[in-house]
Image (cartoon, grey):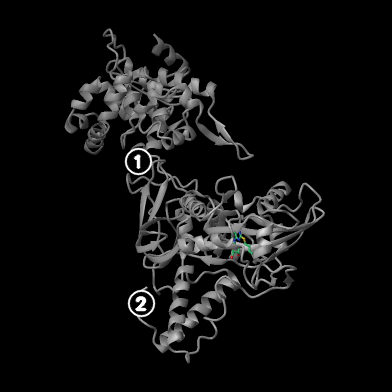
Amino acid sequence: MTETALTESDFAAAVGQVQAAAKSYYDTGDVLMTDADYDALLDRIAEAKRAHPEWDDRGVTTRVAAGVSSGGDVRHPVPMMSLDKINDEDSVRDFVAGLGGEPLLVEVKLDGLAIRVEYESGRLTLAALRGDGSTGENVTAQVLRGIAGLPERLATPWTGEVRGEVYMTVGDFETASANRVAAGAKAFINSRGAVAGSIRSIDRTYETPMTFSAYDVSGSFDSHRARMTHAVELGFPVAGRLATGEFQVAADGDEALAAIARIGELRRSLEFPIDGAVLTADLESTRRRLGSGSRTPYWAAAFKYPADTGSTVLRDIEVRVGRTGRISLRAVLDPVFVDGTTITYATLHNPKFVEEQGLAIGQTVAVWRAGDVIPRVTAPIGEQPHGLTPWAPPETCPQCGEPWDKSSLLWRCHTASCSAVNALEYWCSREAMDVEGAGEALCVVLVNTGLANDVADLYSLTEEQLAELPVGNTKAGGVVLLGKLNAAKVVASLEGSKSQPFNRVITGLGIRMTGRSVGRWLAARFKTMEALRAATVEEIAEIDKMGLIKAQHVVDGLVAMSGVIDRLAAAGVTMSVPETDGEKPFEGRTYVVSGSVPGYTRTTVSERIEELGGRASGSVSATTTALITSETTTAKATKAAKLGIPIIDPAEFAEMLAG
Ligand code: IVH
């Protein structure tokens, strides 16, 4: 760090900031500063204190502030220690050398809070936080509200003590933070802040799902592995097996470094947050031989990975439609260096959450990188400038201008051209190609697995590929596959869809501002895809009710989809209206169908009328040939009667259509 030395007044302010941040964190879990900023500020205070020993640091450089809270009312029978930190290759080798050639284990250092839990005859009787190491806060009531991995009752009547870490998975973090914001409180910064902020809050009305993994359990064992295997038998998840499912053993410095590197690489794909790797002697004899100091054991150490949380200024929020048609919010940030990369963009939660948080452009926000490669903006952090206007999401899709479907938290745009999933779903809908079994769930997996990126890809899917696709979850959290039977149905239905009439193919392309009617008009007027693609905007606009704007969308849409259309044609999908033998009994007639005609849907009845040379219209006018309805009192029927237009019974009309 190349920051200038602190002046005496800056020094006093910095001491105040550090104290306020620590107090807020321990009292309420509210994070005023990221760990990295906190450590950096503490370093500058310590540096200034060395140059000016007479300045009053109110004890912040001598008291171990970070990671140590005030005690509580539960005394720990054996102190809850912490680990010495090692930061580089040489210190890892030194630590391993100190074990004298005896094996060590390398496990994830979970980023949460240390907890100690007592069981009596298989029943959870006490849970306490680490506190200052000797005494900690009693959190039994909160733990009994439910923490995954810490059952209220074990399967066996075991009496003993388990120690480990309480943390939040990335998914649980999002839920917890959203629940907290919905309850009118502040959003959480990261997993550790979230656990700190919720595990002590007794009267919390919102749920904050948390998970426990053990790294110690009482009893006499020859090795850490045997001890932790016992913990697994009792029903506790253990930290040592979280990363790969196996304990990671190392025999020397090289192997320890390789294991540290392996966990470091896995870090971004883990569903839970880690801030380091713990190196620990496996054998109890090694541990006894090395012993412990007052605060830390000599047989274990923590290798710290770079901090996963940074803070920076939110400059903009970009709204887009993702490949699944869902709204996605992207934060544009002042560049900030977090865990080895400079971040300028981050994802944000759903629009409601952003709105409820009152997030504003110009605000300083926390950026958390955990669980995957995508960093996320989690919450405002620290002091904020005054007078910022909270950000409001747009009411319509920025791509097509249609209003959002807000029926779920991740708003959705249904316009086919706005996303791959929408395009597939619309193509398969009853309105278009009527492919059975190809609803939203299947279309989402097809896009997510890359099996279908556009509608033409559907026609090269095989039963084998489809059968293996996950299309849902069981209540128990299992995966539901599409299965052979359903796969066969979908493939057969796709095959059948190739002979759907041409107007449905046009409709299925999902060109903006077009639907069933436009599909029929275009098919009737141009007859073949070739002629349609050759048509000019003016020619298309000549169609009654079409207009220049829709016509322009049709031309643009056909150009944009030309590759897809060529592949559909190659797959054998209908690309023209069949040549008729000239029989056009409905030539020159316009029918208005109101209600249902036996044997037809709203779409197929219009299709049949047009096939016979007639026109299907939605409203009664002077040019209407007849109204098809069984009702005589409706507005349409009254109008028809006034204009002297005949009314035909639907059953009779069905016969005319068949004839
Ligand atoms: S072993 C003697 N193993 O890291 C202490 N600690 O300073 C034995 N932690 O607050 C700790 N994951 O809560 C151990 N796999 C792991 C851990 C772990 C997280 C925490 C622990 C403690 C801190 C160490």
Residue that appears at 54% across and 69% down: 30
**Quadrant of the displayed image that contains ligand 1:** bottom right
Counting the numbered discs, the total is 2
Q: Is mark 2 within 8 Å of ligand 1?
A: no
Q: Which quadrant of the structure image shows residue 192?
A: bottom right
Give percent across and percent down for residue 54: 48, 92
Confirm if mark 1 falls within 8 A of ligand 1.
Answer: no
Drawn side of residue 546 relative to residue 163, left or right: left
Q: Which of 50 and 495 is in front in this view?
A: 50
Q: Height in image: 497 above or below 105?
A: above
Percent of width and height locating residue 406 = 46, 47
Residue visible at 52% across and 75% down in the picture = 21
Estimate the x, y position of residue 147 in percent, counting from the top left: 66, 55
Among numbered discs 2 and 1, the one appearing first in the sequence: 2
The residue under label 2 is 3
Residue drawn at x 57%, y 49% is 248
Give the answer, above or below, for where 608 lies relative to 110: above
Residue 371, can we see it? Answer: no
How packed mark 1 is, by other alpha carbons closer than 10 Å (few <14, some 14-19, many 20 or more), is many
Hey, what amino acid is under mark 1? Cys
Binning the other alpha carbons within 10 Å of mark 2 as few (below 14), some (14 to 19) or many (20 upward) gives few
Residue 171 vs residue 36, the one in the foreground:
36
The answer to whether 221 appears left or right of 114 in the picture is: right
Picture quarter with the N terminus: bottom left
User: What amino acid is at disc 2?
Assistant: Glu
In the rendered image, which residue does mark 1 sit on? 418
- Residue 246 visible here: yes
Viewer-side residue, 50 vs 554? 50
Q: Distance between the residues labelled 2 and 1?
A: 48 Å
Q: In this view, does 151 lie above or below 189?
A: above
Secondary element at tag 1 = helix
